[in-house]
Amino acid sequence: MSRFATPLASARIPSADAPAARSLERIVRAYDRAIGACERIDAREARETLALLRAALELDTPAARSFDALYAWCEEAISEKDFVGPARCLRSLRDAWCRAVEPDAIFPRNDLPLS
């Protein structure tokens, strides 16, 4: 059982064109793995998955550098034993990727606490 709630839509991955969909599916799975690791308070797996996400970036654009900074913040927070902040950040990023491809795919839960 997780230590805090997971979004209802976490298993839903948007359906899109084949190559792009496979890439997006891998990204979403990496987010799910990192979020799950944070929920289980598994620092090793969370850091491994964040390293995978960071390695996938091509840091030649401002957007990629921004993602890298967010992942670095998540790694730093996990090192300081904060798993809630990174899980929220990663959940937001995951949902944004899904919405970018299929805007109606994610239905946010309104029953989750904000703190």
Image (cartoon, rainbow, N blue to C red):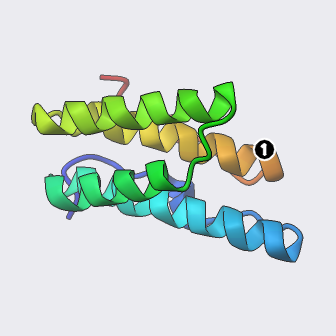
Q: Residue tagged by mark 1?
A: 100
- Residue 51 seen in this snapshot: yes
Is 47 placed left or right of 98 in the picture? Answer: left
**Residue sitting at 23 percent across and 62 percent down?**
45
Q: Quadrant of the N terminus?
A: bottom left
Vertical order, 24 against 103 (above or below): below
Q: Quadrant of the C terminus?
A: top left
Of 25 and 11, the residue lying toward us: 25
Vertical order, 81 against 56 (above or below): above
Of 63 and 88, the residue lying toward us: 63
Residue 91 image position (x, y, % from top left): 47, 43
**Residue sitting at 64 percent across and 68 percent down?**
25
Of 100 and 71, the residue lying toward us: 71
Residue at disc 1, secondary structure: helix
Vertical order, 105 against 82 (above or below): below
Residue 9 image position (x, y, % from top left): 57, 57
Residue 78 image position (x, y, % from top left): 19, 39
**Residue sitting at 65 percent across and 40 percent down?**
96
Q: Residue furthest left?
A: 81
